[in-house]
Image: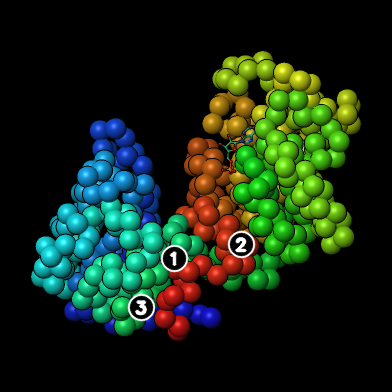
């Protein structure tokens, strides 16, 4: 069901409560180390302010114990947002205090206020109705633009919608839905899914959901060893999920039944030392059976796999990528992830990079502007790709 967007609303002079994702990384000195999430919210914020909204923002930050946990204060985000907007951003020290309510009702058209961390109260996560009602306050319109938490039914994402007349999505969520849902409804073929990262268990559901739709899967990262072990190969000291071996075999069988090509790396880069500059070797499925000796662990795909995977990427019509090919955070182990990033960036396919570490990789190699879309949500983007309803979106007003 299509949902109301801020494009559909007249917000002039209205009290608007917007949920943003300002869950930003801070260093020990309380300084913001990456303001991407604040920058991502700017289009919706600017549109609402220029249309005359009286705008109150709320967000969570980290996992605080309670209100005394001030290292999780959103005050640095208010300062940074003010610099980016070149406009005063007021700050309320509690998201549900009388002072916050007074500051909200005093807002004039085009003015903006940020509330303190909603997770200072446990009622945020438990989606407590009376907390949600106080947080909703005098708002006439609710806007959700926090895609990263849209898969959680919390007071600030779902609860408030029951106390506010109209609830709409912001421009960021609108774009996430456009790429992760609309454009994947009838993807240009070949539809290639690239999966990597640490664990199969995190991505089983998305793999299963996309097995029906994709033409080809490429599997890299540590999750490849769970598949290889399930096939009977030795994996040495590599990261493996021993309780997921049957599941890995089920996935391989299902791929065969569905005629979906499922490519595991033909060779693996292995090491005895998990550190930069470590000596590495390559074990190849064709040359030596691809078995990894004890005392060695797989940390990247090898050169044959790189060539095979990049050839697939160059022919794809649509690419969905989630998870690195190896331990790319360590320069000596980054070759596979780097090559795949460069191939995706070079490809003319519609390329969607879904959340988390593959986004970090794309940024590390300076190629973020060469892919079609980078999702701002890890868990939320996986759940959308799995075909699930996200509570923070389902709760919005139907268009
Ligand atoms: P995920 O969050 O599941 O996408 O996993 C990302 C993490 O997987 C990154 O921090 C990588 O360093 C890690 N990773 C990728 N390949 C391997 C590997 N072969 N062994 C251990 N960790 C890996």
Identify the secondary structure beneath mark 1: loop
Identify the secondary structure beneath mark 2: helix
Q: Is residue 289 above or below residue 339?
A: above
Any part of residue 157 in sight: yes
Identify the secondary structure beneath mark 3: helix
Depth check: give the residue in front, 63 or 389.
Answer: 63
In the image, what residue occupies the spot 77% across and 43% down?
245
Residue 284, percent across and down?
83, 28
Tag in front: 1 or 2: 1
Colour setting: rainbow
Calculate the distance from the C-alpha at mark 3 to the C-alpha at mark 1.
12 Å
Q: Earlier in the sequence, mark 3 or mark 2?
A: 3
Q: Badge 2: few (under 14), some or many (20 or more) residues near its Cα, within 10 Å?
A: some
Q: Which residue does the numbered mark 2 point to in the structure image?
A: 385
Relative to 94, is 143 on the left or the right? Answer: right
Residue 228, percent across and down?
80, 38
Quadrant for ligand 1? top right
Q: How many numbered tags mark residues here?
A: 3
Q: Which residue does the numbered mark 3 point to in the structure image?
A: 162
Q: Earlier in the sequence, mark 1 or mark 2?
A: 1
Q: Which residue does the numbered mark 1 point to in the structure image?
A: 153
Question: In the rendering, which numbered label is found on residue 334?
Answer: none
Any part of residue 39 in sight: no
């Amino acid at each position: 069901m299509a949902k109301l967007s801020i494009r559909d609303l007249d917000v002039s002079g209205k009290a608007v409560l917007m949920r943003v994702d300002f869950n930003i990384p801070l260093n020990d000195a309380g300084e913001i180390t990456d303001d991407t999430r604040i920058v991502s919210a700017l289009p919706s914020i600017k549109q609402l302010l220029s249309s005359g909204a009286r705008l109150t923002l709320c967000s969570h930050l980290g996992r605080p114990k309670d209100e005394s946990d001030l290292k999780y204060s959103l005050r640095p985000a208010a300062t940074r947002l003010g610099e980016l907007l070149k406009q005063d951003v007021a700050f309320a020290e509690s998201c549900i205090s009388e002072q916050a309510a007074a500051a909200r009702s005093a807002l004039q058209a085009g003015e903006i206020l940020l509330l303190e961390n909603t997770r200072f109260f446990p009622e945020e996560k438990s989606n407590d109705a009376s907390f949600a009602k106080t947080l909703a306050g005098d708002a006439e319109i609710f806007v959700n633009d926090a895609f990263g938490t849209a898969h959680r039914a919390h007071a600030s994402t779902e609860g408030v919608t029951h106390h506010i007349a109209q609830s709409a999505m912001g421009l960021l969520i609108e774009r996430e839905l456009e790429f992760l849902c609309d454009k994947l409804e009838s993807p240009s073929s070949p539809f290639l899914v690239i999966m990597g990262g640490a664990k199969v268990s995190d991505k089983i559901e998305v793999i299963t959901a996309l097995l029906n739709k994709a033409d080809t899967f490429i599997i890299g990262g540590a999750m490849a060893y769970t598949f290889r072990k399930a096939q009977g190969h030795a994996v040495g000291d590599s990261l493996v999920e021993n309780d997921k071996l049957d599941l890995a075999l089920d996935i391989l069988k299902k791929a065969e039944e569905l005629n979906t090509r499922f490519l595991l790396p033909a060779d693996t880069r292995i090491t005895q030392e998990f550190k930069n500059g470590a000596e590495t070797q390559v074990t190849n499925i064709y040359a030596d059976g691809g078995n990894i000796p004890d005392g060695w662990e797989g940390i990247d795909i090898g050169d044959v796999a790189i060539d095979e995977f990049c050839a697939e990427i160059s022919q794809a019509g649509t690419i969905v990528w989630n998870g690195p090919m190896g331990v790319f955070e360590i320069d000596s182990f980054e070759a596979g992830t780097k090559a795949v990033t460069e191939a995706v960036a070079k490809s003319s396919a519609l390329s969607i990079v879904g959340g988390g570490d593959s986004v970090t990789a794309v940024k590390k190699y300076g190629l973020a502007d060469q892919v079609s879309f980078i999702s701002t949500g890890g868990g939320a983007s996986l759940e959308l790709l799995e075909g699930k309803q996200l509570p923070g979106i389902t709760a919005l007003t139907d268009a």
